Image (spheres, rainbow, N blue to C red):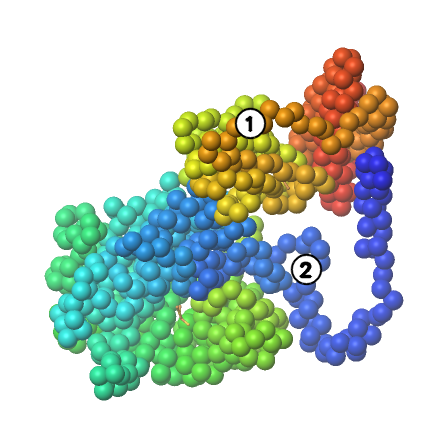
């Protein structure tokens, strides 16, 4: 088939496709329900979750990726997965950990005491907030195993920074943000000497410590400032989850804990295991911390330095009255501040009670110095009676709590019961319960941990999937279940398998609040978010050679890589800097070099680099790894690594195929016909109000650019024809055609978009 005919077929397929999509099925809804064994309730659930093609989800969810060390992004109510964001683990599709720029980010977190850690145990993502409401600007996530916090910019969903905790050996309760995201909290989990020194377990009480770190976040730069961050030294209890106060409780932080018994197991030493000793007492402690005052004390020089990091010693915190403890029922988990900031909810895993603490009561006790005693480290304790607002028996194994948009309504996960309890935390009474499958950990209502929860949906993050999905071997996916909470009764709507680690917690946001970029400003290093010093404009591509080093400053555009041939000597270090010249949305190019562990994802406007060692002579094809256009497979080139002492043969290459005037004339005719097709598409686009559609404006800009390139190549082909070099003339005419195809491709995309989005005719400009 000639290429012009291909284009004509392409045009025809577009309208044929529309025809097929529009044709109705012969089966009735009742027939389908019968055939698939669906009840009315099932169909209702389907109708509440189904998104017809092109319809966007109302909410976006950012879920921990568990042991994958990544973040999973999906939509609600459709539960369609949209992205895995590479965070603590390399992610080849995004080039994360494969280009020089992202390697630098990954390395901030992966180089630990001379070891390279390429996974993470992510638990708690947190969205940035302004006045306690999710603002859609940043996402933070922790690693429990190698205590770290990562910063993801939601303009492009890329990880920008990872900070290692300088004093902890393990953590759990990060990341949670203060109401204006000036701090991110990261509490320890398993106690150890702060700073990583050795101490025998016999000195657990004296030398082992817990802590809570407050990372200072600079909103202007979008980065954590380790030098302005600080920690509070805490007793060697297992600190657990945390939350920041808001409204009346702004300035305070709440951290629950377990194993305040400070039990040290040792089965092989003949001792009962940790689980026996760490759950023996009837209560543990909620840590109540005045973090604003703590920050001032650090500024005033009251902290000591451990590994260069500011740590407020316990005796200072006690003397300054910024740290108190309150008993929490047996093996507590979660500390969730209510939207109005008046209460804190904590559940006891081994107690059927969930306790609602009153911030007002806590403050009254602190002001009156009404303490029931002190712990062994001298920290004052407020009695449960003096701090509790209500206790409610919700069911077995209560864990985490989230809030509804309706006043006083909360949802608590019941691990042992495998249920969600809906209850009234003002009155302390149960309103409804629904079963989930199976053994729920966290749960998450839409923006349900902020000061303005949105209600509507709740997600149960279940630990087990058992019989919910087709078997995929003994390792099952996790199961996120979507629940409709808009009515009085909760309704289970949807099961979603998550095949990537155990997602502990998730956060959500109204989709409309996210302001994502569709392209980068020309030549952006996305990881620093600054202009890359290696970006080049079209026509400025070059290769610089120094002894032992080859540096390529190249570009990518449909569908070629400039340069297409790179020569190096065995042993050279080669760096490719590639800039994607595209402006059209979604025109990403990849870049892979045979056998060299390189895969870049270069989105429109981005500049990314890859440094490789050419340690073995050979011929290494490189190519684009994203199907970017009809000529994607031809987006290729060669890295020629010459052996030492290689002498050029002096043999002149022979063309695989030679063209003459006949082929040239036919090509020109075909191009002229193609131009007529393009003109008709352009005619349509300019006849409607395309300027009202920003996505189309970008496409039109791109198509215009492609046509400009077509015009340049047309001139070149004509120059060669005039000189009688028809072989070159034909080949440049081919390239002219390639640009026409790209312009037509984009033009058709724009036309379809306009037709489907109700573009209207405009009066022709006079
Ligand atoms: S945890 S199931 Cu957040 Cu790591 Cu509670
Ligand atoms: Cu660029 Cu395929």
Q: Residues within 10 Å of mark 1 (few under 14, many from 20)?
A: few
**Does ligand 2 reach within 8 Å of label 1's beta carbon?**
no
Q: Residue at x 40, y 60 (%)?
A: 120
For the residue pair 476 and 725, the one nearer the viewer reads as 725
Q: Residue at x 41, y 81 (%)?
A: 397
* Residue 123 on image: x %, y %: 41, 64
* Residue 752 on image: x %, y %: 76, 42
Q: At numbered mark 2, what does the secondary structure look like: helix, strand or loop? A: loop
| CA separation in Å, label 2 and label 1 | 61 Å
Q: Which mark is residue 44?
A: none
Answer above or below: position of 133 versus 757.
below
Q: Is residue 390 visible?
A: no
Q: Which mark is residue 51?
A: 2
Answer above or below: position of 50 versus 589.
below
For the residue pair 275 and 402, the one nearer the viewer reads as 275
Name the residue that disc number 1 marks.
648
Answer above or below: position of 295 versus 343.
above
Question: In the image, 745: left or right of 159?
Answer: right
């Amino acid at each position: 088939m000639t290429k012009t005919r291909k284009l004509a077929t392409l045009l025809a397929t577009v309208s044929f496709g529309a025809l097929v999509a529009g044709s109705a099925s012969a089966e009735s809804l009742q027939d389908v329900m019968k055939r698939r064994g669906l009840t009315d309730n099932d169909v209702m659930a389907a109708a509440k979750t189904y998104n017809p093609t092109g319809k966007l989800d109302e909410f976006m969810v950012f879920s921990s990726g568990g042991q994958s060390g990544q973040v999973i992004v999906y939509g609600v109510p459709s539960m369609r997965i949209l992205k895995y964001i590479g965070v603590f683990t390399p992610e080849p599709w995004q080039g994360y950990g494969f280009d020089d720029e992202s390697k630098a980010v990954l390395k901030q977190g992966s180089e630990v005491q001379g070891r390279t850690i390429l996974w993470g145990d992510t638990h708690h993502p947190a969205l940035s907030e302004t006045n306690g409401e999710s603002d859609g600007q940043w996402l933070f996530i922790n690693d429990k195993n190698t205590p770290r916090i990562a910063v993801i910019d939601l303009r492009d969903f890329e990880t920008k920074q990872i900070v290692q905790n300088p004093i902890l050996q393990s953590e759990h309760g990060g990341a949670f943000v203060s109401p204006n995201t000036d701090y991110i909290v990261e509490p320890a989990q398993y106690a150890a000497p702060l700073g990583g020194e050795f101490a025998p377990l016999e000195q657990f009480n004296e030398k082992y410590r817990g802590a809570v770190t407050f990372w200072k976040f600079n909103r202007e730069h979008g980065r954590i400032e380790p030098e302005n961050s600080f920690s509070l030294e805490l007793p060697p209890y297992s600190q657990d989850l945390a939350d920041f106060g808001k409204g009346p409780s702004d300035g305070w932080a709440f951290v629950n804990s377990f194993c305040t018994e400070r039990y040290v197991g040792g089965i092989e030493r003949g001792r009962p295991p940790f689980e026996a000793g760490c759950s023996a007492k009837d209560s543990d402690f909620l840590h109540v911390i005045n973090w604003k005052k703590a920050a001032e004390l650090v500024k005033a020089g009251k902290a000591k330095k451990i590994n260069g990091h500011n740590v407020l010693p316990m005796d200072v915190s006690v003397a300054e009255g910024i740290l108190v403890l309150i008993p929490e029922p047996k093996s507590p988990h979660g500390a969730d501040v209510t939207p109005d900031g008046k209460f804190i909810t904590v559940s006891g895993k081994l107690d059927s009670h969930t306790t609602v603490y009153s911030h007002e009561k806590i403050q009254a006790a602190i002001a009156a110095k009404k303490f029931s005693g002190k712990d062994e480290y001298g920290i004052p304790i407020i009695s449960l009676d003096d701090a509790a607002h209500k206790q409610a028996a919700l069911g077995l194994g209560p864990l985490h709590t989230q809030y509804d948009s309706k006043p006083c309504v909360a949802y608590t996960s019941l691990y042992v019961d495998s249920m969600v309890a809906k209850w009234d935390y003002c009155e302390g009474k149960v309103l409804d319960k629904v079963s989930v499958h199976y053994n729920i950990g966290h749960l998450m209502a839409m923006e349900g941990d902020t000061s303005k929860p949105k209600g509507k949906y709740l997600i149960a993050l279940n630990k087990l999937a058992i019989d919910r999905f087709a078997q995929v071997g003994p390792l099952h996916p996790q199961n996120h279940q979507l629940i409709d909470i808009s009515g009085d009764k909760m309704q289970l709507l949807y099961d979603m398998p998550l095949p990537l680690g155990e997602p502990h917690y998730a956060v959500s946001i109204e989709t409309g609040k996210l302001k994502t970029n569709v392209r980068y400003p020309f030549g952006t290093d996305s990881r620093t978010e600054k202009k890359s010093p290696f970006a080049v404009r079209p026509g400025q591509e070059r290769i610089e050679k120094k002894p032992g080093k080859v540096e390529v400053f190249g570009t990518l555009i449909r569908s070629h890589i400039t340069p297409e041939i790179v020569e190096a000597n065995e042993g050279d270090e080669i760096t490719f800097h590639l800039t994607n010249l595209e402006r059209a949305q979604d025109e990403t190019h990849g870049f892979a070099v045979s056998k060299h562990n390189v895969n870049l994802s270069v989105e429109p406007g981005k500049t990314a680099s890859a440094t490789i060692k050419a340690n073995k002579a050979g011929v290494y094809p490189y190519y684009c790894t994203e199907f970017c256009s009809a000529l994607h497979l031809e987006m290729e080139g060669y890295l020629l690594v010459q052996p030492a002492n290689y002498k050029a043969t002096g043999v002149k290459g022979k063309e695989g195929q030679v063209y003459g005037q006949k082929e040239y004339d036919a090509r020109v005719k075909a191009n002229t016909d193609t131009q007529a097709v393009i003109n008709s598409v352009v005619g349509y686009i300019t006849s409607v109000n395309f300027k009202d559609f920003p996505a189309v404006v970008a496409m039109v800009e791109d198509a215009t650019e492609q046509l400009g390139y077509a015009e340049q190549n047309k001139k070149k082909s004509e120059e060669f024809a005039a000189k009688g070099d028809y072989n070159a003339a034909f080949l440049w005419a081919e390239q002219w055609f390639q640009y026409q195809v790209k312009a037509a491709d984009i033009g058709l995309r724009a036309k379809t978009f306009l037709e489907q989005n109700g573009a209207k005719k405009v009066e022709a400009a006079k």
